[in-house]
Image: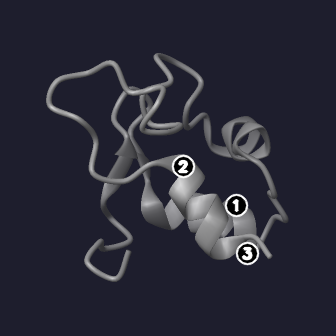
Amino acid sequence: MADFKYSYIVCSCKNVTLGEIICSIKDNGAKTIEEIGEMTDAGTACGCCKSKEDDFGNPKMELYLDQIVKKFVS
């Protein structure tokens, strides 16, 4: 995750950045993908950004919400 800038778009449908997602976790207490979606709208459209298993797009995403949750939610 160190390779991604806070401006990296994780959810292209809703144009949500990595920085916005991290803020929802660290500053606003989001602990699940659903809570992140409620706060940022990430993952609330097509859902491809939620996990590799949910990604039906081609090409595949490089970073998923489940990876971010695993790294930042303790």
Amino acid type for the residue under numbered disc 3: Lys
Q: Is residue 24 above or below residue 72?
A: above
> Label 3: which residue?
26
> Label 1: which residue?
24
The mark found on residue 65 in the picture is: 2
Image position, residue 35 (x, y; %): 79, 44
State if disc 3 and disc 1 touch (CB < 8 Å).
yes
Helix, strand or loop for disc 1 = helix
Pick whichever of labels 1 and 2 is earlier in the sequence.
Answer: 1
Does residue 71 appear to the left or right of 55 in the view shown?
right
Image position, residue 16 (x, y; %): 45, 45
Q: In this view, does 10 lie above or below 29?
A: above
Image position, residue 65 (x, y; %): 54, 49
- Point 52% across, 58% down: residue: 67
Mark 1–mark 3 Cα distance, whole angstroms, equals 6 Å
Helix, strand or loop for disc 3 = helix
Quarter of the rendering containing residue 11: top left
Image position, residue 43 (x, y; %): 55, 31
Q: Which colour scheme is used?
A: one colour
Mark 1–mark 2 Cα distance, whole angstroms, equals 12 Å
- Point 69% across, 43% down: residue: 33
Pick whichever of labels 3 and 2 is earlier in the sequence.
Answer: 3
Q: How crowded is mark 3: few (under 14 residues within 10 Å), some or many (20 or more)?
A: few
- Point 23% across, 35% down: residue: 60
Extreme front residue here? 53
